[in-house]
Image: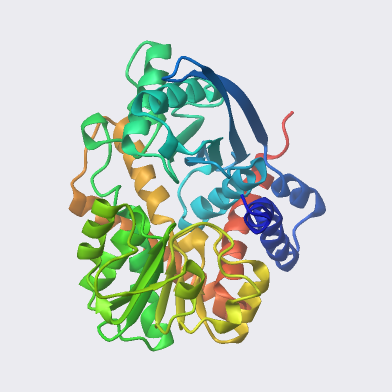
Amino acid sequence: MTTEQSAATLNAWAVAQRQFDLAAEKLGLDPGMRKVLREPRRELTVHFPVHMDDGTVQVFTGYRVQHNLGRGPAKGGIRYHQDVTLDEVKALAMWMTWKCAVVGIPYGGGKGGVIVDPKKLSMKELEGLSRRYFTEISVLIGPERDIPAPDVNTTPQIMSWFMDTYSMHVGYTVPGVVTGKPISLGGSEGRNEATARGCVYTIVDAAPLVGIDLKKATVAVQGYGNAGAIAAHLMAAEGSTVVAVSDSMGGIHNPAGLDPDKVLSWKKEHGTVVGYPGATEISNEDLLEVQCDILIPAALENQITARNAGRIKAKLIAEAANGPTTPEADEILYNNGVFLIPDILCNAGGVTVSYFEWVQDLNRDHWSEAVVNAKLKEIMDRAFGETVAVSQREKVNMRTAAYLLAVKRVSDTTALRGIYP
């Protein structure tokens, strides 16, 4: 891990707290309430052994953080990544609290992570790690308490192992203990596309406000995983031209346009978008600065900083990733007239459809994809409209507006509930 990477990873919590402080200041929040909402309610660190294929035992470290439970059970993904830190997980848990509040779904924020590079594990080792980790954090987990979901490097298969592990412990099948499961195990139609679809719904809402015609627009996508690749595909379906995409190995650029589906096939075959024929290779940093109308950061946090924000040419930024922009960069972008759809609004489609999945599981029900997408659009359009209204009324950028909306909802609930005992 380079020092720059570790600095970027470690300061996620400072960024999250700073974003909260800005909103708390503007709302004139009571000092006691600020102290409550500024810290997570629970942080669990676990160290657990796993049998490796070579006969050795390795000990891994994992986390589960619950930020706030005022509006409902904790909700949030679990990531497997070699650079996971407690600070990063705390930041992501706090962002989940605001994300659920902004779209008005009855959850608090949670997040989990294991320090591991899953690409180095066999399927058997991955299953052993997943089951043991979930067993260790199960003191906090339950369909009415804390409902994990997929995140970076975790999959529907891993969610299946989590669900099975929990179910074996309680003695009956509990599909509602995790979301992002395969459809055959109680997963929701449309869940796989939900983050990207929600992101694109907000882009469609934002385009007229910044004078962008989507049929003539150019798009760059940083991060060609689930959210990024599907967002590129959906933007192409809107008539836009995707000119650049990247993944962890690097990026590709073609001003005349790329075919998102062919790029995805290339990535599946070669493990990266790099080397795609007919495109120029560019770095992840360069991708952020290419000539385009719409930039979709869909990778990791802290990608747009004070260092490069001034060179971004996009008119509209849609944050499909969590925390891709630092507070300093926010200010630069806002002053340069860039319209930014903040992560807690832009990528809330994932948690919204996770909520739908949970509701379906609790009711032993199953909705069609058309019903799921219609409900998602309604929630995303409403949340976008409410955020724009606050932004215009308070004369603040969209992130601050989303925070004002979310923090007020959470603080109102917390105040009504009071302090127990």
- Farthest residue in the top direction? 171
Q: Quadrant of residue 295?
A: bottom left
**Residue 125 relative to residue 110: left or right:** left
Q: Pinpoint residue 95: horizontal percent, then vertical percent.
A: 57, 52
Q: Quadrant of residue 399?
A: bottom right
Q: Is residue 378 visible?
A: no
Q: Is residue 302 visible?
A: yes
Q: Pinpoint residue 332: horizontal percent, then vertical percent.
A: 63, 80
Q: Quadrant of residue 43?
A: top right
- Residue at the image point whose x is 40% and y is 33% from the top: 178
Colour convention: rainbow
**Residue 194 relative to residue 153: left or right:** left
- Residue at the image point whose x is 62% and y is 70% from the top: 305
Query: 147 and 165: which one is in front?
Result: 165
**Up-down: is 195 above or below 157?**
below
Quarter of the image with the C terminus is top right
